[in-house]
Amino acid sequence: MILYDCTPAPNPRRARIFLAEKGIEVEKRQVDLAAGAQLRPEFMAINPFGTVPVLELDDGTRLHDNASIARYLEETCPEPPLLGTTPIEKAQIAEWNARVEYEGFLGIAEAFRNRAKGFKGRALTGKRPYEQIPALAERGLARAEDFFVLLDERLKESRYVGGARFSVADISAVVAVDFAGRLKLEIGTDQAALRRWHDEVAARPSYSA
Amino acid sequence: MILYDCTPAPNPRRARIFLAEKGIEVEKRQVDLAAGAQLRPEFMAINPFGTVPVLELDDGTRLHDNASIARYLEETCPEPPLLGTTPIEKAQIAEWNARVEYEGFLGIAEAFRNRAKGFKGRALTGKRPYEQIPALAERGLARAEDFFVLLDERLKESRYVGGARFSVADISAVVAVDFAGRLKLEIGTDQAALRRWHDEVAARPSYSA
């Protein structure tokens, strides 16, 4: 398998950690997002949506986002389980993963892409150019702060984001929290549960994948 | 089971169609979103995120979004399958469902909630009040139009949104397309594949659930 990757970007990092947790090694090919390589014809032929990660299977089939990559890998390589085992656990992990994407990634990306000079005219991923909206950068930052509060509350009552077991929801959440560091948003000294969880997740070998 | 529902709202409609496709009957309780009932203490005790749908299981466990509801119901009531059967089908349905949420629902909701008078100070779902951003309403409309183009292209090559089989991705997509009608966005006369698919999905009994 081949992973189309970009080391500094948050979304392909989610795929790399997922693969590392499963113990799967793949060939990695860098797509230089800073240079706009994801929108060049060579890469658009691989992923017409102009985003990474992409996982190319041995038969040439390509999976174009983290949702499909996680689901495929869980089905074909079930151990260790990262999407849950019982129906209720699967449901709660899916819910928390969606919540992290919606409450976490979206706000952080809004704040980041609507403010950083390098994203002028590219406030959304993909091929259509969208201008930055300054008010959205501000709102994104407020959402990112709320997200840290939400995670801290959750982690007061639950060892991991999705429940008692490490899961894809932790992978998404730790990548989102680290991504927020680029907004200079750090875990607050009063957010002890979030700190405890981050230390624990960061100690896993997959964290540096 | 009890579904906390709101008949006119798009997100609980997704859960209703999913349940209808599975042939599962549940008690439905209306939450009057127009009156702000989702943010009152009675409902916040049921779902602290202040959103519908919520599915309450017979043991009292609550699932608070469509991701968890779909996953739980698929696991406990596998027929007919709505999240795919083979690993690759499951992955591609997950990918298209995520794409419909991100490219479809988000843009349409941005356009709708940042423009409609009734959503002043409630530009995002949930308890935190967010002011409307007019530039975001405009951008959302452009994204919604792009989404119709994307779906039409997809449906030229695929019978259903997720592949050869009707799935949760069709449920999400048909609800998104109908939701866009509130922006006066209709299927274009040149979007024959999208029209063919919509007619087919709308003829299913679940469409009026």
Image (cartoon, coloured by chain):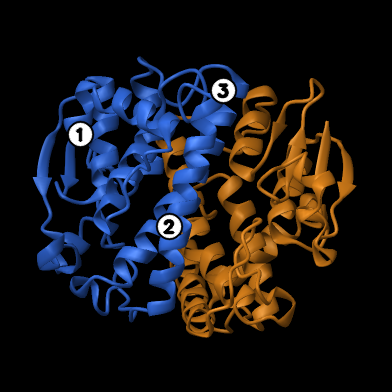
Chain colours: A blue, B orange
Residue count near mark 3 (Cα–Cα under 10 Å), binned few <14, some 14–19, many ≥20: some
**Going from the N terminus, do you reach mark 2 or mark 1 first?**
1
At x 21% / y 63%, what residue is drawn?
Answer: A44
Q: Which residue is mark 3?
A: A89
At x 58% / y 41%, what residue is drawn?
Answer: B67
**Going from the N terminus, do you reach mark 3 or mark 2 first?**
3
> Answer yes or no: do the residues labelled 3 and 1 have beta carbons within 8 Å?
no
Q: Give the percent coordinates (x, y) of residue B33.
A: 80, 61
Side (left or right) of B150 relative to A59: right
Q: Which residue is mark 1?
A: A58
Q: Which residue is mark 2?
A: A106
> Answer yes or no: do the residues labelled 2 and 1 have beta carbons within 8 Å?
no
Question: Which residue is at the front of the view, A194 or A208?
Answer: A194
Query: Could you say whether the residue bearing mark 3 is in a helix, strand or loop?
Result: helix
Foreground: disc 3 or disc 1: 3
**Going from the N terminus, do you reach mark 3 or mark 1 first?**
1
Q: CA distance from mark 3 to mark 2?
A: 24 Å
